[in-house]
Image (cartoon, rainbow, N blue to C red):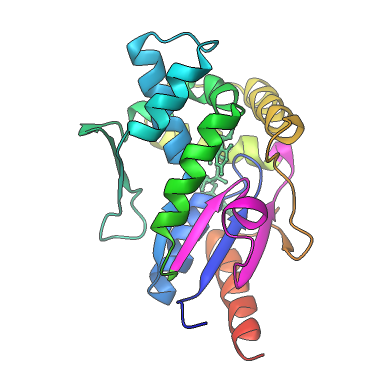
């Protein structure tokens, strides 16, 4: 078994998966895979093309035929750039519309099959930190380290509000953000296929009151502990 290590980070919306996974990857010299960006990009394309969400065949076809490009910026503080079929969608996939619809697309079995396969190809040689909802349970069940990142809904809503503020986006109340996050958690956790779930061998990292650097250090610690065994 000579493949490079794989670290799986799963958890609910706003737990810090993207931010922390990027930092862990940069510090350990590993690639970073944001699986959520793929579900978001596909959702954006479905909306753009005006395909009905009922038309699962057309969406599945689109999922398997589309080319997804996730390109990290040199600076690990900066989010990656995302393309689908040569259209840049970095900003567009973070819209309120995509955010509110993505869970419905992500619940379609054929969509998951197509995207999981692409993620597994991406990780064939290992050497990556992958984050999402089903990385430790479905995509890379043999990952060397599995982290389940959590935080209270209140904390996650506060983080989102701060993100929006920093990006100069219109103000959304905490109550509204809490409701949106709780609703997406509910959809992602109760779907029939590959629901958001802590893998039995995952380490749960509770992040309320911890900053990004602390959480990153904690995960890197677990990683070194694992490697020394
Ligand atoms: O960043 P945030 O937590 O808001 O969401 P994301 O990681 O970008 O994922 C967006 C949506 O994609 C989630 O709410 C899930 O519905 C879906 N997703 C999934 O089903 N499986 C994954 N491995 C990653 C994301
Ligand atoms: O990917 P996910 O939806 O799980 O979270 P994210 O998109 O990384 O957003 C998390 C936000 O909370 C970012 O603005 C982070 O700077 C901030 N944050 C964090 O990620 N981890 C902490 N321990 C504290 C704050």
Picture coordinates of residue 115, whole percent (x, y): 47, 40
Residue range highlighted in magenta = 128-154
Direction from residue 200 to residue 104 in the image, left or right: left
* Residue 136 is a magenta residue: yes
Residue 95 seen: no
Residue 206 seen: yes
In-front residue for pair 183/113 = 113
State which quarter of the image contains the C terminus: bottom right
Looking at the image, is 228 positioned above or below residue 84?
A: below
In-front residue for pair 18/210 = 18
Q: Quadrant of residue 46?
A: top left
Residue at the location (33% across, 32% down)?
65
Residue at the location (46% across, 26% down)?
60
Residue ranking furthest to the left: 86
Q: Quadrant of residue 187?
A: top right
Picture coordinates of residue 222, whole percent (x, y): 64, 77
Picture coordinates of residue 206, whole percent (x, y): 73, 57
Looking at the image, is 18 positioned above or below residue 172?
A: below
Direction from residue 34 to residue 76 in the image, left or right: left
In-front residue for pair 189/78 = 189
Residue at the location (43% across, 38% down)?
38
Direction from residue 127 to residue 188 in the image, left or right: right
Picture coordinates of residue 25, whole percent (x, y): 43, 67
Rendering quadrant holding ligand 1: top right
């Amino acid at each position: 078994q000579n493949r490079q290590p794989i670290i799986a980070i799963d958890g609910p919306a706003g737990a810090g998966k993207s931010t922390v996974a990027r930092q862990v990857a940069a510090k350990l010299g590993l690639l970073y895979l944001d699986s959520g960006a793929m579900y978001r990009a596909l959702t954006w394309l479905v909306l753009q093309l005006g395909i009905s969400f009922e038309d699962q065949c057309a969406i599945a076809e689109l999922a398997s035929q589309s080319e997804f490009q996730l390109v990290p910026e040199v600076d690990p503080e900066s989010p990656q750039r995302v393309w689908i079929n040569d259209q840049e969608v970095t900003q567009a996939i973070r819209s309120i519309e995509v955010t509110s619809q993505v869970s419905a697309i992500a619940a379609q079995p054929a969509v998951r099959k197509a995207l999981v396969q692409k993620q597994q190809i991406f990780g064939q040689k290992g050497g990556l930190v992958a984050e999402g909802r089903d990385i430790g349970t479905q995509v890379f069940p043999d990952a060397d380290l599995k982290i389940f990142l959590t935080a209270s809904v209140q904390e996650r809503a506060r983080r989102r509000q701060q993100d929006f503020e920093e990006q100069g986006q219109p103000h959304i109340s905490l109550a509204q953000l809490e409701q949106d996050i709780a609703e997406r958690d509910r959809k992602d956790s109760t779907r029939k296929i590959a629901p958001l779930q802590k893998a039995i061998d995952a380490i749960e990292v509770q992040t309320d009151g911890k900053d990004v650097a602390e959480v990153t250090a904690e995960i890197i610690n677990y990683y070194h502990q694992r490697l020394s065994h």
